[in-house]
Amino acid sequence: MIALEVTPSGGVSQRLLRFILLFSLCFTLLASAVQMYFEYQREMSNIASRLELIRNGYQASIERSVWDLNRNQLEVQLQGLVDFPDITWVRLSSNDFNITHGSKLELESVQVDQFPLSFQVENQAPRALGTLEVGIDIAAVHRRLVASGLTNLLWMGLFICGLAITLSWLFYRLVTRHLLAMAEFSRKLAKGQWQQPLQLDKTLNSVEDEIDAVARALDEMRQAIVEDRRRSEADRITLQGKKDELLRMVERRTASLYRAKEEAEAANLAKSRFLATMSHELRTPLNGILGMAELLHEATVGELPQRRLGALQKAGEGLLALLNDLLDFATLDSGEARASSVEFGLRELCEQVFTLLEPNAHANHNRLQLTIDPRLHSNCVGPEQFIRQVLTNLLANAIKYTEHGRVHLHVELLGWEDGNQRLGFAVEDNGIGIPEAIQTHIFERFVQADERVGGAGLGLAICKHLVELMGGEITLQSREGEGSRFYFELCLPITRQALSEPANSQPAQSIASLHVLVVEDVEINREVAQGLLEREGHRVTMVDDVVPALEACQRHLFDMILLDEHLPGGSGIGVCQQMRQDPQGLNQNTPIYAFTASLQPAMVQRYLDAGMRGVIAKPVQLPGLRQALADVAQCKPAGPDQAALDSHVLETHQQLLGNKKLEHLLALLQTSLQQADGLLDALAVLDYPEIVAHSHRLASSSQSLGARHLADTLHTIEAAAEREDGPACTTAREPLRLLLQHTAAAVSAARNKLMDL
Ligand code: ADP
């Protein structure tokens, strides 16, 4: 790209002018030098021809005059020579004459030519007469040359300057000013002044010259730009129109999507409410059936009734599982389904599923076969419910679509991964099989190979979801008319504890007897809960609504509370929050479990947020209940009614002092306990003298009323403070706080008891 900069001071015309002048000067100098050279040659040849003329025309007459001694003649002749141009003087030197004519000049500027003179008389030898010297003025020749050279130089210079100026002016007129006009035009184009065409101050010839061609090209470019802009403007307007239309469309769609979303959310809410209600409504009677069956189990004797009861229980549990499946199905899609990990016996699980499905197998004349790899460990930890459901679904299908055949569940140990066993589960049958065309999407919802057979087409979709949730993948091999094989693999950790016993035959472990408050409005549920808890050896207080529950909690310290969510006078969550927020309440820290059939993940989260420790799902299942009881018993500090106050000491005081006096003493102790915050503060800042004083005082009053555990703890803290043992004091603070609470609760319970008497 050539950057053309046209400025008035350094314009092309001026540059052209400078070039012409320089060139002309050089040329003029050269020409003048050549011309002077030729002039010089001409002058020198003139001088030579004059000398030749003297030699040929004058020399003989001068020799004659010298021979004749004719001085006058000689004078005239010599004067004639001096009159020749450029001859400045002549001198004749002979024996008789010495004549000089003309003015003598400096030798440097004069060229001297000598002519020897002689005369010959007839028949005699020539006789030398003397010398004629001619002085020629060379300086004059030089001056003439210089003058003519300078004159030439001057004229040529003048001529060339004139020519150069004229040429430059012409160049400016013809080219430069048009170039400047075109540059200005381009600048205007760049500024966006497209409309004005290019006009040059020049008459148009019939034949277009180069300037016209460039100007025309520029103007065509302008017209192309104008056209292009017109087109883009038109496109822009069209595009803007389309964009506006699109925006309106997006707005319309957004609005309708928003409406659809709100409708969907409303529908979803309605669905959740429906599910919650159905869940509650279905589980409540089921709770009754299962609970009663559980209670009857113990009372019933005889193998057949026991087996029938077992089958009833299994059927109920199956129904419960099915109900759970249906209710959970909505959450499967949204990814909310969670697999709770429990300890279970894999062999027992398989056997239970088989027992449950036995009647169906009989009805279809199928033979059920269970093969469990003897190498595998039956006691596993994992999502038992999910595995049970997947196996039940697959086996139920296999039985359903097979007649007079064989259904085989094969569980195989494939290997070990990080201490977990990798198990392969295969459910095989030799039934009707599944057509190849359907096999690829058989795990999709509502897909059925044969719609004449009952079913919703959900079972396999649920299986696929559940197996994937457990980290596996379910596959199918089938041939129409020959049978099917469903297969998946799972990785399950094992437990060390043996779970070979049926879960509901005996308590899993013996735990301390607990005092449990059950808050439940439905009578049958109350009876079931009471029956189960008492059978497990626990003390139960039953209430049916919010107010009696709160009253009971003011009077007694419970080890555990089972709280129904839906109560006539309010919600379980509300009751729990009230208890947790009451610092004076006896049961502020008592473990509370939601005793409910509303098990949606969002609800469970709300129970936990309200301060509950967990959920005991209705219909109540003994393993879950036992687990919760064991957890509570394990975490329970020395119970107020067991260790916080020594009952023997209290009984002795009661006998010696009487109820009133003892109650008064207990009230004093309760006040001291409630004022023990000072001790806790002192422990927090390690104020040793304060700790010693407080703990000593409180220890002696606790000791005298049988709060031995507290007294021992206070003595230990007192000793630590005396040693100024900071870490021991700091670690003792939190257990002491809990112990103070429990002792206060025990004191309060003992007072209530005394007051009731
Ligand atoms: P359904 O409630 O219809 O049984 P599933 O999702 O459990 O729904 O099964 C989907 C379809 O897959 C069934 O309708 C049946 O056609 C086919 N199917 C499932 N298991 C088998 C099997 N073991 N043998 C033959 N067909 C089967």
Image: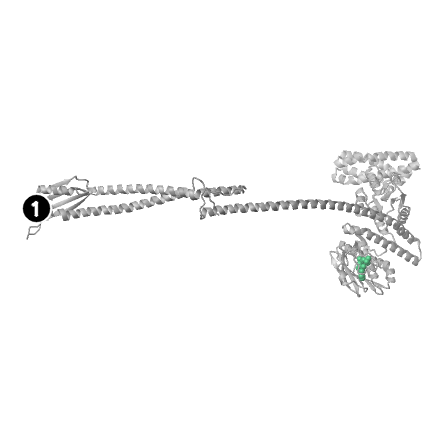
* Image position of 165 (left or right of 727): left
The x, y position of residue 409, in whole percent, is 81, 61
Q: Residue furthest left?
A: 123
The amino acid pointed to by label 1 is Trp
The x, y position of residue 731, in whole percent, is 76, 41
In what quadrant does ligand 1 lie? Answer: bottom right
Q: Which residue is mark 1?
A: 67
Vertical order, 286 against 434 (above or below): above
Q: Residue at x 24, y 46 (%)?
A: 40
Displayed quadrant of residue 397: bottom right
Q: Residue at x 13, y 47 (%)?
A: 59
The x, y position of residue 168, in whole percent, is 39, 42
For the image shown, how many numbered marks are present on the structure? 1
The x, y position of residue 724, in whole percent, is 75, 37
Of residues 134 and 277, which is closer to you in this image? 134
Residue 598 visible in the picture: no
Q: Residues within 10 Å of mark 1 (few under 14, many from 20)?
A: some
* Image position of 245 (left or right of 578): left
Residue 99 visible in the picture: yes
